[in-house]
Image: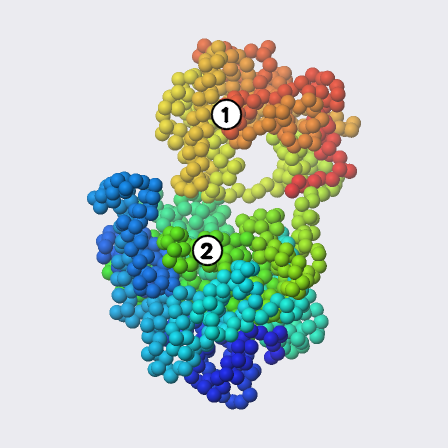
Amino acid sequence: MKTYPSPFLLEVARNVYQQHKNELTKIIVVLPSRRACMYFKQYFGSVIDQLTIAPQIISMEGFAELFSQLLKADNVTLLFELFKVYQEKDKDLKIEEFVHLGKSLLSEFNMIDNNLNEKKVDEMFEHLNEVKLLEDWAQGLGDEEKEDLKSNWREGKTSMTEFLIFWQRLADAYATFKKSLLSKGLAYGGMLFREALTNLEDRMEELEIEKVIFAGFSQMSGVEQEIVQKLNDLGKGQTYFDADKRYLDKSINHEAGYYLRKYVNGFGAQHPHFAIDQFNTHDKLVGFKSVSSTVGEVKLAGEWLISLLSTEKDKLEFSQTLNHTAILLPDESLLPALLKSLPDITFEDGKTLAEYTNITMGVSFDTTPLFDLIKEIFLMKERVVEKDNKATVYFKNVQNILRHPFFNSNYREIDQIASGILDDIVNKNFINIPLDYLVDASGDMEIFKVVFRPWKNNYKDIIKNFIDLINALLRMMKSSINSVGEEEVKISDSIYSYEEELLSILFEHLKHLNKVLPNFIQKESDLPIKMFKTLLLELLRGTKVPFTGVPIAPLQIMGMLESRALDFKNVLILTCNEGMLPTKKSVEAIIPFDIRSNYGLPTYKDKNAAFAYTFYRLFHRSEHLMFSYLDANSGSDVGEQSRYLLQVKEEMMEDSGFRVKQIDDHQEAWLLAKADKTMSEPIKVSKSEELKESIITRLKKGVSPSSISSYIRNPLTFIDQKVIGLDESDDIEEDLDSRSFGNVVHTAMEWGFRRMAGLKDEYDPKKKEIQPSFVLRIDDFKKAIDDRPFIIQLIEDAAQKEKVELVKGQNLLLKSVAENIIVRFFKKQIEELEASESKAFGIVRLEEFINHNVTLDINGEKVELRLAGMADRIDVLDGKLRIVDYKSGSYVESKMKPKNWEVFIDDVDYAKALQISLYSYLTKSAMGDPSNAHFHQMIRACNEVLAKEKVPTIDFSKDIDAGFYFFRKINDGLISCKLDGTFYGEEMDFLPKTEKWLELWGKHLLDTETLLEDVI
């Protein structure tokens, strides 16, 4: 295959061959990555002019393994070996407590060995021990105070004692851990390099190596630099740097040359470094695309590839070019979506674009659907509780499992079982679901039975059950595409090959754990489900899911760091935003930043320098570079466009020496901009005569004040829900949204009032149960406030009705918020009663319907309207009837006082005032309508109770008061609406004015010439 243009590794291959053609078997070429090694082999094969044995070509990690003669231990073994070291000091230490710390410690130890020699390690740990650390922490103290602090620490009298013991143990653990591993011939990465450095001369002699050539490195760890320097001292080292002269210019101080400036004055001084004017060798076309979503980004990639391969000539060049195109992903989570967005392009040889594509990067296992399923199964098993002598599990975990993609198949029976259980959860109000019910409901489906059957609380049984689940899923997948009933389980080329690969990786982890854990765990029960979950999930988080493909392909999809030492004609980088390019300024570390910096350990500055070099090196030989970034409307948590892009625009494009030209000036949001614009426009639907008749039927059946105000907010939603009946399906929520939270507080208020009066919580009209009226006084509210368990029980019972658990996370916090609201509300009720004459509320009804029938004249047509609303509370205070509604939110005072009623028809900000006005109309009309028997019977019953309790009865000469209590502004009390506004400039009495407005609303609603709009 051709190469285009002349890549760095090709130039290195030419130099190596010309200089060492007679001693190729005695040299080793070391490159930054295995991918670079594969390309170098290809390039080397193209430069040789005779049959020869190629030199040994290995990655830096391969070099360390070759020279150390130690076996690199797997992460499980390393974690448990380190755990044994710490457990010797702390016998009570549990593995689940240690996993997160252990993982961080392994990273720190690896970093220490990679960057510090033995002398520096000792100095650093000494700096972390008692005296030096105390001196650093006590810089603001006097000498006498410092001595007191040191004395108190030695005697264990300071809160820093445990902290400092941790640092002392860290030094001991480091030394003991390494000694233990060496005795077993094992090592972690940093140890391999240290041992390679120690064995360097002996291994060079054993292997008969005369020269080790390092090429394409920009950032080398301390131990790697020591290795190169030692080889230089032996006359057996050589380095090739891919640099631009600007990187080495101290006056420019280019961040991409942060390391190279050090190297050329150190171990790399005597070697060629290609510090030419890389940027000025050829013209480069550069484009920038602002995209509104990650979906838009992957679609952009597909369109970009189509534009590169638009002609048969383009396709032919692509298929014959070794290094044609690269798509780089700083955000690896885009990979699955990107693969689905690759265009369907067929080449002359019959191959597709997919067959000319290689994926260098892997997907993190913790971003896969299987990881989510494993977590959900663990959560379900951890939440098993005994209720009524039955083992039960939390409904939300069951829902998530049954809705998981791995449980979706072509089997109708599986879908029927899952749907049946999901429907039962909602219809039967399941919060805690019996496991025996789930097993029985699973029928003969093995995948369900394995998940829902009881698991023993030990790691052996957990592993067995997961392996059973893997086999069941694999058999299901195979059966769903092959009905012959073949039982063999293996990775196939089926439509489920990705899922099978995930299951295979999980199986290998489980099999490995089953083999390794007995060496560290004496009894199976010593590693129960909670501990095993922590261990398995941590291991899976560090696992990459590999993709198979042609290693050397014209199209490479890779992460940023995988592009080291590689060159491509065309480059596209997605998600060029701060936080992705470069990554966020954070390094997960135990050793403090100042100490890391003082001892030359890597910090975020080093990460940024490495990213900068990787980014700018792409300009050395590429001809066409495209950068996309998410704009401010993406809704993601990434930052603004990368500063690297701004530097390209402001520096490189302004300097002719870089020979960078922009493809076009069109930089606004691309691809989804049109879709976004369309989505932001309201959906408009015309009204047919059939719909008009349905609306009239609905008006006659009844609408509430809140539904009318909802029409003002969104007409189409009103039609969908109130006329057509397309309401959202019921569901059970794990986290309280604002609606559910409001419902919990509403219900707690209602039940609290009844419980204070000694009544039961609910009355069922279907059973002809009639709510009794009752009286509440100041002492009732005071007792409730003082009885915290009473209020807590109210909230928990209300949450049970709302199908929500308030035991952890956000819900637990909202439980405290609800308690605070109720207490403050009760205190406000006391204030209102103390300011009243009667010192008592007469409660007419709670959650009670009031209705009134009215005939509207709409364009000469008589339309019957039944206005029916449920009031949260109807009460009496000092003889005045009040209609009270509770609102979770807040209000704007000016929007509760409309100067004219026309605003109600088109200004959603007045929706609350409209709702209160309609409740006032509804109550006054019902009171003035003798035929409304239900309302008048309710009032009479209340007056009887009030008279008996010696509380003023309802005074019909007093005006009715209607208003809201706003939970966010409880201290404002009952907020009423001003009802005296004009109607199109005309002063009118309240009742006829309201009916005129209802007629106006009816005209809008029934006008077939007016389109219904869905407000987005």
Disc number for residue 143: none
In depth, the one of 906 and 673 nearer the eye is: 673
Q: Classify the position of the N terminus by image quarter.
A: bottom right
Rendered residue at 70%/75% (across/down)? 313
Left or right side of 369 for 909: right
Left or right side of 123 for 314: right
In depth, the one of 47 and 725 nearer the eye is: 47
Rendered residue at 70%/74% (across/down)? 312
To which residue does mark 1 refer?
970
Count of numbered tags: 2
* Residue 250 can be seen, yes or no: yes
Rendered residue at 62%/32% (across/down)? 707
Q: To which quarter of the image does residue 652 belong?
A: bottom right
Disc number for residue 604: 2
Which comes before the other along the chain, label 1 or label 2?
2
Type of amino acid at the residue the image marks with label 1: Ile
Q: Classify the position of the C terminus by image quarter.
A: top right
Question: Where in the figure is residue 31, as x and y percent of width and height?
Answer: 47, 73
Q: Which residue of the protein is positioned furthest toward the front in this rendering? A: 251
Type of amino acid at the residue the image marks with label 2: Tyr
Question: Where in the figure is residue 18, as x and y percent of width and height?
Answer: 52, 84
At mark 1, the secondary structure is helix
